[in-house]
Every structure is written in C-alpha cells, then in structure tokens.
Image (cartoon, grey):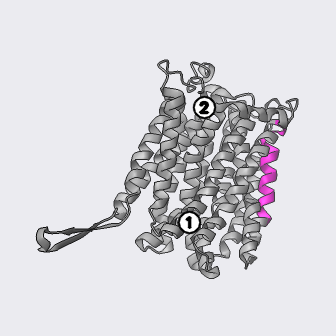
Amino acid sequence: MASKRFQQTSVLIANTFAFTMCFMVWTMFGEIGVPIAEELNLNGTQFGILTAVPILTGALSRLPLGAMTDQYGGRPVFFIILLLIIPAVWLVQFATQYWQLLTLGAFIGLAGGAFSVGITYTAKWFESDRQGLAMGIFGAGNAGAAVTKFIAPTVIVMLGWQAVPNIYAAIMLVTAILFWCFTFTNPAHRSPGKAPLREQIKILNDPKVWKYCQYYSLVFGGYVGVSLWLTRYYMSEYGFGIQLAAVIATIFVLPSGVIRAFGGWLSDRFGAHNVTWTCLWASLIALFIMSYPETRYSVEAAGGAGRVEFGFGIPVWLFTAALFVVGIAWGIGKASVFKYLSNEYHENLGLVSGIVGLAGGLGGFFLPIMFGALVDITGIATTVWMLCFGITLVSIIWMWWTERRSPVITRSSSSGAKAKQGVTSER
C-alpha cells in the first residue's frame, strides 16, 4: 500500500492537472467565441453571454458539488464530472445556432464546478499548516485559461474553430483516465452523518461568509471575466490579430493562475488578512491606470489667437504592465481568500468553499455580460476597467470596516491551530 506522503503528492498532482484541463475547457468560448461571433454577427452583449453561460452553470453547481464532496468524497464526484462534460465539449463543433451553443455551454460549465470538489478533496489530504500551500498549488489550475489561449487560437487559424472542441474532448477523456489511476480514496475524509443541506445552509447567517464571497467574486470572478474578455479587447482596442491578442493576454492569465501556489505559501506565512489587504490595494492602483480612456484635449489661446489640440491614451505597454500587476494581485488573492476558509470552516469546508466558489463563479458570469453592455452603451472600451476598479474599492472598504477599523485588530489569518486567533467580529 502506498505511503500517506505518496498518496498526498499523487492526489495533489492528479487533482491539479485535472482542474487545469477543466479550466481550459471552461474558458474556451473566450477564444472560439471570437470567430463564432463573426459568423453569427453577435454584438458585444451577445458575445458576453456566450462566454458567460458556462461560468454561470459552473458557479451554480459549486454549492451542491461541494456538499456532495463532503458526503461522498472528492474522487468519485470529480471523476463523474470529467465524464459528463466530454460529450458536451465534443458536440460544440456541430452547433450552428446561437441557442445550441448556449445549451452546450451550460453543460460544459460543470467543468468550473469541479473547483469546489477539487479544493476540498485536496485540503482534506493535508495537515492544517500545509493546507494553504496545497490549495494554492491546486488552484494554480486556473492557468488552464492560459493553456486555452495558447492552443485554441493556433488551432483556429490552422484548422478552424470547430477543431478545438474535438481536440479538447479527446484531452478530457485522457484526463479522466489519468485522474482515476493516480488518485486515492480515504473514507475518513467523508462526512456521511452530517446534517441535511437545508440545515448546513444556515451558515449563510454568518456575515463573514458573505464578506469572503465578495472578495472571491473579485479576485476569481474578475480573473475569469477578464480572461474571457481580453482577447477581444486587444483586438478591438489595439488592432491585434487573434493569435497575437491571445498570446499577449496570457501575460495576465498565466501568471495569475500559476502564482496562486505562491499565494498559498504567503498566506500560511503572513496570514490571509495581510496578504488579501495588500493584493486589493495593488490591484486598485493598477486598475486606476487601466481605466483612463483615450482622451483628446483642445486648448483655446487667449484672444482667439489659436488653438492647440493634443490627445492622451494608455499605450499598450503601460496597459499590459498594469494588467500584469492586477493578474499577480488577484492570483495571490485567490489563495489568501481560501486560507480564510480553511482556518475558520474546516469541518464543513466543502459546503463553504462551494458557497464562496459560487460567488466567484457568479462574478465571472456577470462581468463579461456587464463588460459587453457597458461597451455597447457608452462606446468606451475602458469602462470595463472602471467597473473592476469600483468593485475593488468596495472590497477594500468592507475589509477596513470589518477587520481593520477596530482598535483591537483581530484577524482570521493565523495558520493551523491558531486559526481562530482574534477574528474581528462582524459589524
């Protein structure tokens, strides 16, 4: 029989790989949606809905899937999810109408629901002082959004967009087989005797849960929403082709996904509160820079002697640099928010991670639609970053009000046995 250390490592690697592939599939409409939008003549709002429908079903499924993980274990639940999404992914290549794509996208969204399964399955294999790092490594599977930005545009140019779902379905089949072969089941991780879900859901009366939902709707929901929108943004705002736009977009997507593991280590070392607070401020400053629209000024000389006109806009290098900062901040923040949860809700982590994950997924669902609507209404592309700036500011104010305003600053960020040390009461 394999040692516990081997089982921990094997589960973590297989879990992370499977989640990476799930995230790749979950966000594929951000890339194949561009040529689809041209074929079907979709506007910005319709494109946003197309990319967001998988995010919605992924978000809504996280709560029941998290509760099922507590009850039945992560291995069987994750494996069934992998099997269910394969036919939906494969059938996308045959879709010719908008409603067909939306229907299949809804089924593909289960790939995003795998997060609450995998994060719980991973955490329960590790000791409390190592959970932050383990969950951070698993969460680095968010980099699957970058994988699809490398693979999908090249396949689209060479073989057409219909080839992408065909290839992805084959990848997911291999992933399911590898996952089952290299993961293990520990009956001690199950909680079959827990209260009914209706009773467990009473945890929503805890205001801290709502606060963590707000944080995660920004750092994760923002990551998903921006990832889906970036390729189109670079194409429309800076005139890049789909391949170049997708590659540049990975400057945000890839580091933000991979650095989540480092964010878990930072949260173990410095505490969830300190890490999250720093990440929110860093992203706020960067988003302020990104929000500045292309502007032209006209200065009339005294006495009508003449007029001077000049313009100012954010060049692509400055925008991309600020975008990189946002990606790093949100990537670390995704890990630090879940460190809050592992500290405070260890007994029902699956349920709470499902609730918080649901909030994050809903953020990823609503943001692309809101991005499209804002651009359609105002005609100003940078309104998408103004929206993200406002959401970040709300998170900072909420954190200050509940965690820093009191003269006795108590934080829910200590690791291990100190997890409960000085948590500020909600107001």
Horizontal side of residue 196 vs 169, given as left or right? right
How crowded pointer 2 is (Cα within 10 Å; few <14, some 14-19, many 20+) is rated as many
Name the residue carrying label 1: 372
Image quadrant where residue 195 sits: top right
User: Which x, y percent locates residue 254?
Assistant: 51, 54
Does residue 72 show up magenta in the picture?
Answer: yes
Horizontal side of residue 402 vs 131, given as left or right? left
N-term-proximal mark, 1 vs 2: 2
Number of numbered discs on residues: 2
Q: Nearer the viewer, mark 1 or mark 2?
A: 1
Amino acid on which disc 2 is placed: Tyr
Does residue 77 show up magenta in the picture?
Answer: yes
Image height of 180 relative to 230, above or below: above
User: Which x, y percent locates residue 273?
Assistant: 52, 30
How crowded pointer 1 is (Cα within 10 Å; few <14, some 14-19, many 20+) is rated as many
Amino acid on which disc 1 is placed: Gly
Name the residue carrying label 2: 340
Q: Quadrant of the C terminus?
A: top right
Horizontal side of residue 293 vs 83, given as left or right? left
User: Which x, y percent locates residue 420?
Assistant: 62, 20
Q: Quadrant of the N terminus?
A: top right
Towards the viewer: 251 or 362:
362
For the question of whether residue 1 can be seen, the reply is no
Q: CA distance from mark 1 to mark 2?
A: 33 Å
Residue at image x 66%, y 34%? 209
Magenta residues (range): 71-87
